[in-house]
Image (cartoon, grey):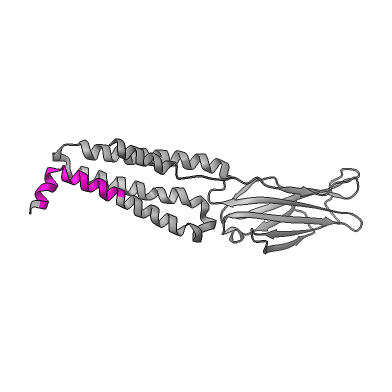
Amino acid sequence: MKKIFYILILLLLSASVIGIKPLTEVNTGDVGLEIKYPKFETLKKAQDYDFEFHVYNLSNGLAMNEGVTCYFHLYNKLGHHIAELEQSTPSHMYDYGFDIDGNNFTNVGQYYYNIYCNSSTLGGFASSQFEVTHYGISNDHIGFNIIAMIIAMCFMSFIFLYFAFNLNEEHFILKLFLVFFSMITLMGLAKVIFQPYGGMNLLLTIPQFFFYIFALYFIVYIFYHWAKKTEAWAKVFKR
């Protein structure tokens, strides 16, 4: 059983996650329009989002809610234009809003937008970058969540196998189900480990496939050695 435990620990160490911090850029100076933009790092995949902006006069700090037109451009990680909107009428008194459909966020990865606003005499801009993930959580936090899930799943698989090896022969059906549950748990590890990298599905197809093969081989190996020590299976083999 110690060997089984060490192998499960190796599965835990196979996951790694890298987080990317967002970049922002705004116009500076004493004359022009200042744009207050939503500050966030991540969005959930395929989730609708309402981008709201406030526009101020830099020279006196007054909020602008008339005579201003704003232009919003959204780009994906390849730099392709995926949304281009215009707004000249604020909602909620000061919010220049742009409702972006979740269909524009169907791929995980980096996105960025540019917002430009101008009146008859003044102008200003802002630009920001964010990341779309499966869970709407930054990869820094996803890393800890994944590690916790892997530990829990490895522990569950270990417990299933422990009882499968140590229950009496009179609980043969239960032992068989425990081995089956252990296999399902191990197979589920692949989804937990690889899902945050959904934007690289093509690149990860091969290692994910081999992970499934390894998990299947591992559980068959365990099942074979367990069956050799089980009297009920020994009777079946003799037949």
Compared with 159, 129 (above or below) is below
Examine the structure image and report whether residue 230 is included in the region drawn in magenta. Answer: yes
Quadrant, the N terminus? top left
Q: Residue furthest left?
A: 239
Q: Residue 23 location, x and y as percent? A: 71, 48
Splitting the image into 4 quarters, where does residue 97 fall? bottom right
Q: Residue 49 location, x and y as percent? A: 64, 53
Q: Which residue is drawn at 16% across and 42% down?
A: 229
Compared with 226, 103 (above or below) is below
Quadrant, the C terminus? bottom left
Q: Residue 90 location, x and y as percent? A: 77, 54
Q: Give the range drawn in magenta.
A: 218-237
Q: Residue at x 65, y 55 (%)?
A: 111
Does residue 211 appear to the left or right of 107 in the view shown? left
Examine the structure image and report whether residue 150 is included in the region drawn in magenta. Answer: no
**Whether residue 37 can be seen here:** no
Q: Which of 39 and 24 is in front in this view?
A: 24
Q: Main secondary structure of the magenta part?
A: helix
- Number of callouts: 0
**Whether residue 231 can be seen here:** yes
Splitting the image into 4 quarters, where does residue 230 fall? top left
Does residue 18 appear to the left or right of 172 in the view shown? right
Compared with 89, 189 (above or below) is above
Q: Residue 146 location, x and y as percent? A: 48, 43
Q: Nearer the viewer, residue 236 or 228?
A: 228
Q: Which residue is drawn at 68% across and 60% down?
A: 75
